[in-house]
Amino acid sequence: MGIALMSLRQAEKVEPQLKAALRGGQAAGGMTARERMALREGSIEEAAAILNARQFVQRLIEKDRETTQAQMVWALGRIEPTELDAMVRQLARMRGRYASLVLEYGQSERPIGKLALEELQGLRERIAEFEHGFEMIKTAILDGTAEVTGVKTARL
């Protein structure tokens, strides 16, 4: 059996909670086993951070947003406008190629072959990935996560 050691500050915070839990003959005080253990072991942060499922998920979403934003700042750094121009040109080329292939295959009297279909599917997937990435970068620029050389940040 281990003895939990608490600092004076921790003890001052836990003592009222323990008294409240033990008051009125209710040893549990309506607390879960995890909450009682957290109080007994002096884990103030754990005891204070007992959340319902909705609160937990909201905090998880916020942590995901903050962590992703920090990673985007690190990964993107300062973007040069020429990098974005090249990305836009590449995306336009892929869209044009896809459209011309669809038109070309649509002119044929026979069904589209397996290789042609795979080419179209692969190109469509590349376009979708590029579009998704482009949207992420645009969002990062708008929320101030990504900095573009020569452009004022949009952060309010």
Image (cartoon, rainbow, N blue to C red):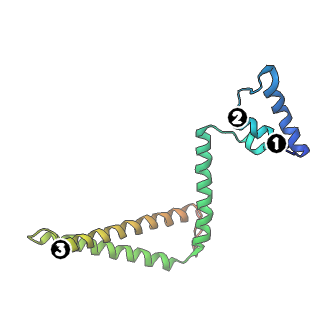
Decide: few, some or many residues near mark 3? Use Cα within 10 Å; few <14, some 14-19, many ≥20.
Answer: few
Q: Which residue is label 2 attached to?
A: 33
N-terminal of the two: label 1 or label 3?
A: 1
N-terminal of the two: label 3 or label 2?
A: 2
Which residue appears at 58% of the width and 68% of the height?
146
Nearer to us of marks 1 and 2 is 1
Q: Quadrant of the C terminus?
A: bottom right
| Residue 123 placement (x, y as % from top left) | 31, 71
What amino acid is found at the position of numbered circle 1 in the picture? Answer: Met
What amino acid is found at the position of numbered circle 2 in the picture? Answer: Ala
Nearer to us of marks 3 and 2 is 2
N-terminal of the two: label 1 or label 2?
A: 1
Q: Residue furthest left?
A: 109
Q: Is mark 2 on a helix, strand or loop?
A: helix
Which residue appears at 59% of the width and 45% of the height?
58
Q: Is residue 155 visible?
A: no
- For residue 104, the mark is 3
Q: Residue furthest front?
A: 1
Which residue appears at 28% of the width and 68% of the height?
121
**51 on left or right of 39:** left
